Image (spheres, helix red, strand yellow):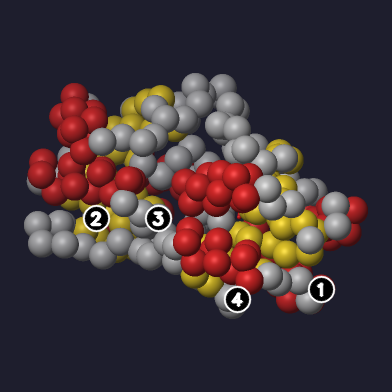
Amino acid sequence: MTLLLLAGTAEAKRIARDLAAQGRPAVASLAGATRAPHPTGLPTRTGGFGGEAGFRRYVHEAGISAVLDATHPFAQRISCRTARICKELGLPYLQVLRSAWTPESGDDWVMLDHEEDAAGHIPQGATVFLATGRQTLPRFANLSRGRRLICRQIDPPDTPFPFSEGDFLIGRPPFSVEDEIETFTRHQVDWLIVKNAGGETPRSKLIAARRLGIRVVMLNRPPQPDALRVETVEQALDWVEAL
Ligand SMILES: NC(=O)c1ccc[n+]([C@@H]2O[C@H](COP(=O)([O-])OP(=O)(O)OC[C@H]3O[C@@H](n4cnc5c(N)ncnc54)[C@H](OP(=O)(O)O)[C@@H]3O)[C@@H](O)[C@H]2O)c1
């Protein structure tokens, strides 16, 4: 049995470490979005599979017999495609999806489905911190008019900031609540835009926003695959054990 672990999250890192420690035959797969990712501890392949046909070829050639999908809740394309192909091929597939965040007392959130709608809620002149990554930055083009955008990303940018006002900010998570308070204060942030990724560690930015009275646009998750799903690393490891 060779398990394919679709990685790219903190959960995937923990699962990879455990599978490696148990000596399970498994391969981790990273999209290649981060230039210098931490080693997974498992044999690791990097980069897209080359679309659906490439994925099918890879599964066949590498003798993959099950897929554990621990990609990000917003990595919708890879999750939906993989779940569908596994169903078709009769391969066991499990998605690990941490629970979404819900507002707590003192939080001031606007929940939206689309980045483009943020401009309807955030006033002109505001400084907006985008904790949404560089991939979706173009979707904030309308928001950039009359507002300063700060987009945090892990790697130094290889292209200039696409809007007239604002900049990239380089930083590799995790960030503590104190780190986030310092960052938001230093940049005089008025609004924070976040994807509803869920998880304890990345929650620090929401706690910092609450303490500083910063308003939050919370982007709702895209639809998830119609497939077997668990919320925790422990449940995922139990599933592997039972295969
Ligand atoms: N979206 C986010 O906000 C976010 C945040 C943190 C981390 N990540 C991680 O970054 C990766 C890319 O995210 P995304 O939103 O671009 O995904 P996506 O839109 O669902 O996938 C786009 C393409 O990236 C490739 N891909 C994605 N995950 C892969 C993996 N684990 N191994 C090999 N190829 C992969 C596939 O290319 P081919 O079609 O060529 O196979 C896929 O079609 C994911 O692994 C995800 O866990 C995403």
Estimate the x, y position of residue 105 in percent, counting from the top left: 10, 62
Q: Earlier in the sequence, mark 3 or mark 4?
A: 3
Taking 83 as reference, is 114 above or below it?
Answer: above
Mark 3 and mark 2 in contact? Answer it, CB < 8 Å: no
Please name the amino acid that badge 3 sits on: Ala
Please name the amino acid that badge 2 sits on: His
> Tag 4: Cα neighbours inside 10 Å, few (<14), some, or many (≥20)?
some
Quarter of the image for the C terminus: give it: bottom right
Distance of label 3 from label 2 (alpha carbons) = 21 Å
Q: Nearer the viewer, residue 59 or 21?
A: 21
> Tag 1: Cα neighbours inside 10 Å, few (<14), some, or many (≥20)?
few
- Which residue is under mark 2? 121
Q: Earlier in the sequence, mark 2 or mark 1?
A: 1
Q: Nearer the viewer, residue 71 or 116?
A: 71
Question: Could you say which disc has been placed on residue 227 in the image?
Answer: 4
Report if the beta carbon of the residue with label 3 is closer than 8 angstroms to ligand 1.
yes
Taking 184 as reference, is 202 above or below it?
Answer: below
Q: Earlier in the sequence, mark 1 or mark 4?
A: 1
**Residue 44 lies in what quarter of the image?**
top right
Estimate the x, y position of residue 27 in percent, counting from the top left: 72, 48
Please name the amino acid that badge 4 sits on: Ala
Please name the amino acid that badge 1 sits on: Leu
- Which residue is under mark 3? 197
Q: Secondary structure at mark 1?
A: helix
> Tag 2: Cα neighbours inside 10 Å, few (<14), some, or many (≥20)?
few
Q: Nearer the viewer, mark 3 or mark 4?
A: 4
Instruction: Specify whether 84 is left or right of 226.
Output: right
Distance of label 1 from label 3 (alpha carbons) = 29 Å
Q: Secondary structure at mark 4?
A: loop
- Number of numbered labels in the structure image: 4
Distance of label 2 from label 1 (alpha carbons) = 45 Å
- Which residue is under mark 1? 89
